[in-house]
Image (tube, rainbow, N blue to C red):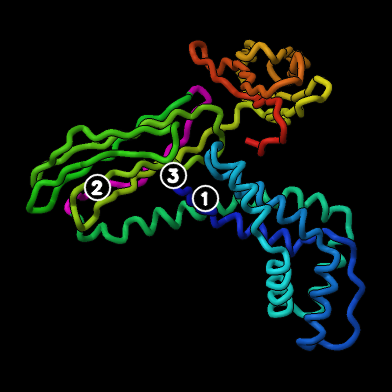
Amino acid sequence: MKRRHFKVNRPVFFVLLLMLAVGCGRQAPPTAGGDTPAKRQQAARQYMAHVPLADTLEATAEQIAAQREPAQRSALRELLRREVRQHVVAEATIAALARHFTVAEINALAEFNAKPEARSIQGKLPAYTVDVLRPLHAELERVLSVTNAANAALRWKTRLLEFNATVADDHLLAEFPFMNMGNRSVNILGVTSTCACVTGAADATNYPPRQGGVVRLAFDFGPRIGLQSKYILVRTDDPSEPEVRLQVDVQIPELVRIEPSFAYWQIGATPTASVHRVSLLQPDCTMTGIIVSNPIFRAQLITNTPGRSYAVRVSPTACTQRAFDRVELLVAVAPDVIRRFPVFVSVDVTKPPAP
């Protein structure tokens, strides 16, 4: 049997550290005395005594699992719950607090954690931090990918293209021209991507010296909004640079806001309705309807303000078996362009991570 290896996304570790710093427990009593190593240790231990470490680790496990392929998530989640040693994390956090913060600063953290806003902040930290660190991590990877470019045979006009999409755009086609400046032919062995929404292809496979070509990238937006960084990897037989990363950055305007964007019912529960607020954020957009593919789910579109505010009521007919679907909202953004925006719904044993 082939062993599965799980690679944890590094930004999630930053989430864990921030959540431990914003522990959101009860206020620890202040530590008397000056700022000595012993007093820092004491303050840090008092602080950690009121941090819900188990909840923090559980939230971190969910964030890590959400970064994996759906088939891997359950096994990875259980592995983390079973094998992560809480006392190791606690002692490391205490040591880090004592090393980097004064007694007054540790007590200030505890004072902040006593406020009701701290609990709300802790709940939002994972998604916020991943949103910030994921593009930073991707940008560093892009920069490091060109370290061998100076000695490579293929010289690219650019490896990064930036675009601003319009409300009518639902896809992007980009071209990356290049020239073989080496003294031997270079073969392109393949073009791959890490996202099903992106495909790439070269216009040929063999490029003799002083012959150029082009690699094309296609990106299907789907429901994505905001700044999207997508890339393809071009594999060649050039030993100086066997893999080339070509990237597009696309700013996609937010057309629709759905709150919440998913609904979950536990097996055996009462099939009550879930209500989702829908706002159209761009002028000249029109809601034309909804599509439900799975007959287990029923959905109703309610118009509050035409062209601006709507609601979608979704409910399963029964919660007796596992079921999944995407309730798709159809929005006309131009006379001949319909965009689809999903509400993810499921009946399952456990609540899935948010999409």
N-terminal label among 1 and 3: 3
Q: Which mark is residue 156?
A: 2
Which of the 4 image quadrants contains residue 327? top right
Left or right for 262, reference 176: right
Instruction: Report x, y in % for residue 355.
Output: 62, 35
Q: Which mark is residue 135?
A: 1
Q: Which mark is residue 1?
A: 3
Instruction: Report x, y in % for residue 281.
Output: 65, 27
* Residue shown at 24% from the left, 35% from the top: 202
Q: Which mark is residue 320?
A: none
Tell me, yes or no, if residue 311 can be seen here: no
* For discs 1 and 3, the disc positioned in front in the rendered view: 3
| Residue numbers of the magenta segment | 153-168
Q: Distance between the Cα atoms at labels 2 and 3?
A: 42 Å
Number of marks in the rendered image = 3
* Residue shown at 62% from the left, 51% from the top: 79
Q: Amino acid at mark 1?
A: Pro
Q: Are marks 2 and 3 in contact (CB under 8 Å)?
A: no
